[in-house]
Amino acid sequence: MRQACRVARVRHLWGDGSIPVAGQAGFGATDRDNAIMLQALAEAKRAAEEGEVPVGALFVDNDVVIARAGNRRETDVDPTAHAEIVVLRWAAKRLDRRRLGGTLYVTLEPCAMCAGALILARVDRLVFGAADPKAGACGSCVDVVRAPYANHRIEVVGGLLAEASTWLLQGFFKQRRTPHPSGNACSTGLRC
């Protein structure tokens, strides 16, 4: 069952505030979840500005943000540097433990690699924004985090501020597909 979350305009993220950020949160989402997801969206926007796919993540333990990051695959030349993986690595180092507990917030539903990492890190709760119908491994394509054979179960809240996450992703890929007036390269400087 879904409950509607408050509608907010995010002027600091979207410039003139013309894009409303309306979240349909899954059961169990709170106002605090909304506030933290807005921070994850800020990380996603920062990643996009660096030429990365705009996905942002935060790890929270005992109401304290322990780690935050956006995708770093291009920056680090590392195919595993998804926002979730980067945040889990930083959180493990900061907390000096591999069994993290806590809550991971991410703007896009985790892929199979990231979902497996969440299980291995023993994350208690996952809150994600947009569903990923092509590669989502938390209910969209497969459900790795709640698989009966897994040795750890994760509470999942999906769809929180999904419209804002989707808008950011669609805008990024639309820009990458638009040919740049100077030739075949798009405005990010990468080949389209």
Image (cartoon, rainbow, N blue to C red):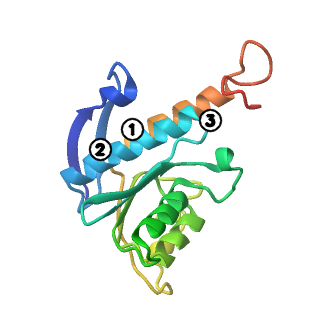
- Structural crowding at the residue carrying mark 3, measured as other residues with C-alpha within 10 Å and reported as few (<14), some (14–19) or many (≥20): many
Report x, y in % for residue 41: 40, 42
**CB atoms of marks 1 and 2 within 8 Å:** yes
What's under tag 2, amino acid-wise? Gly
Q: Residue furthest right?
A: 183
What's under tag 3, amino acid-wise? Gly
Residue at image coords 48%, 68%: 93
The residue pinned by badge 2 equals 23
- Mark 1 and mark 2 lie on one chain; the one further toward the N terminus is 2
Disc 1, SS: helix
What's under tag 1, amino acid-wise? Ala
Report x, y in % for residue 172: 56, 33
Q: Is residue 100 above or below residue 165?
A: below
The residue pinned by badge 3 equals 51
Report x, y in % for residue 51: 62, 35
Distance from disc 3 to disc 1, alpha carbons, whole Å, reads 19 Å
Q: Decide if residue 106 is in sight here.
A: no
